[in-house]
Amino acid sequence: MSDLLWPGDHRAGDLFTDAAVVAAMIRVEHAWLTALAELGVAGLTVPDDLGALVSPEDLPALAAGAESGGNPLIPLLTLLRARLRGRHTAAAGWLHKGLTSQDVVDTAIVLCLREAGDRIRADLVTQIGLLSRLTDEHRETRMAGRTLTQHAIPITFGLKAAGWLTGVLDARDQLAAAARLPVQVGGAAGSLAAPAALTGDPGRARELVAATARHLGLPPREPWHTSRAPLTRIADAFVTCTDAWGKIANDVLVGARPEVHELIEGAARGKGGSSAMPNKQNPVHAVLIKRAALAGPPLAALVHAGAAAAVDERPDGGWHVEWATLRTLARRTVVAGAQTAELLAGLRVDAGKMLATLHEARPGIDAEQQSIDPGGAPDRPYPGATEEIIDAVLARAEAEPR
């Protein structure tokens, strides 16, 4: 999968592609079959090669067939049953028994989101390490602090980097909490009626859910067909990531302006060039990261809109709008995470230019200091609690996610 109009999309690889979603749906069906056999509900040997029954050549037909039933599982089940008959007749008869389409699609989406979360988490760890070094190295790199686009008071670049790090740590913590996505098994209307009938015991029906969750490496949970907080939470966590990265990108874009020239995005062959102006070296990673930060919130809002539109025991349209929206948000967040890690790894800081700008901003930039301590010598340090703030942020970076 690639997207010509979203440069960098190739970084997401096979994440959430049609093939990945089909594979995830088959994993869910396989886990349910395995649970049925384990608990003695179904007398069958579960085929190991369920996924091998579908090939990439089947994807266009599955995508087209999804329209008639409104979801991609229905044509997949038709195909799987047809190919199981004669080879695994018992498995063909028990396939999907006790489940509903939303159970399988939701849990498959969860599996894809978990993979996205793992990749984003790895990039966050890299970013935290890079930002921690940047913060510590520039504790005393003096520069002009800016508020509302204007010079404010003197600060250090270490303090600015600590602010970037704080945003990334907030994203790490929110993602850690949201990424504990649960299995979805509720049956036709969220009552586990069919599993209870199959087992003859409501308690054993819940055991089937727990066993399925275990095989997928997911926590069990009561049915959430119309309670979509697991998905809105992960969408919000992705946006918290792009918010934090967007802040970094925005500061780099300002700092990289030729008239500012305090920050320089790392150069690489073929990176940042212009089609018409050979003199240009554009901060392209920062530009693309800012793009992701702008695009993320509306996508998360659409996931919330779908949750708010849930009706009855299974949603009509509110559920359906989630799938492509979450795919797009997940892939774009993965891409931006990798780009941010590269941006930070190559970022150059012009400490001399920062100090020169600070000197040029005097005496105005010392106005607050002079108002508090009239007559004090100009150009003396005005650090506040910078050291303590930096130490606290670095200590948090070393700690486990909250």
Image (cartoon, grey):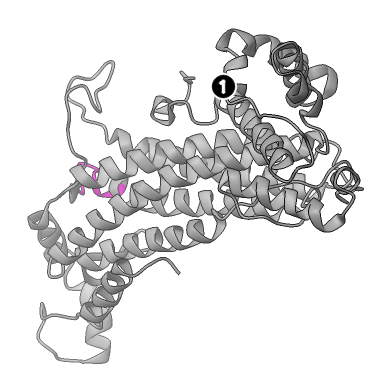
**176 sits to left or right of 195:** left
Q: Is residue 62 left or right of residue 162?
A: right
Q: Residue 162: where, in percent of width, then height?
A: 28, 66
Residue 171, position in %: x, y? Answer: 45, 58
Segment tinted magenta in the rendering? 254-260
Eyeballing the image, is 196 above or below 1?
below
Main SS of residues in magenta: loop
**Amino acid under label 1?**
Ala
Q: In front: 383, or 191?
A: 191
Q: Is residue 221 left or right of residue 256?
A: right
- 28 w.r.t. 367: above or below: above
Q: Quadrant of residue 48?
A: top right
Q: Position of residue 89 (x, y in %)?
A: 76, 18
Residue drawn where x is 82% and y is 58% of the image: 203
As for residue 258 lying within the magenta part, the answer is yes
Magenta-colored stretch includes residue 168: no
All told, the count of numbered labels is 1
Q: Please give the residue where the numbered disc 1 appears in the rendered image.
A: 19
| Image quarter in which the C terminus is found | bottom left
136 sits left or right of 232 in the view:
left
Q: Secondary structure at mark 1?
A: helix
The answer to whether any part of residue 148 appears in the image is no
List x then y, in percent, for residue 295: 54, 39
The picture quadrant where one finds residue 86 is top right
Query: Considering only vertical position in the picture, is 283 above or below 363?
Result: above
Question: Which residue occupies 41% across, 24% down?
Answer: 10
What residue lies at 83% left-to-right and 47% top-to-bottom? 310
Q: Determine the image quadrant of residue 87.
A: top right
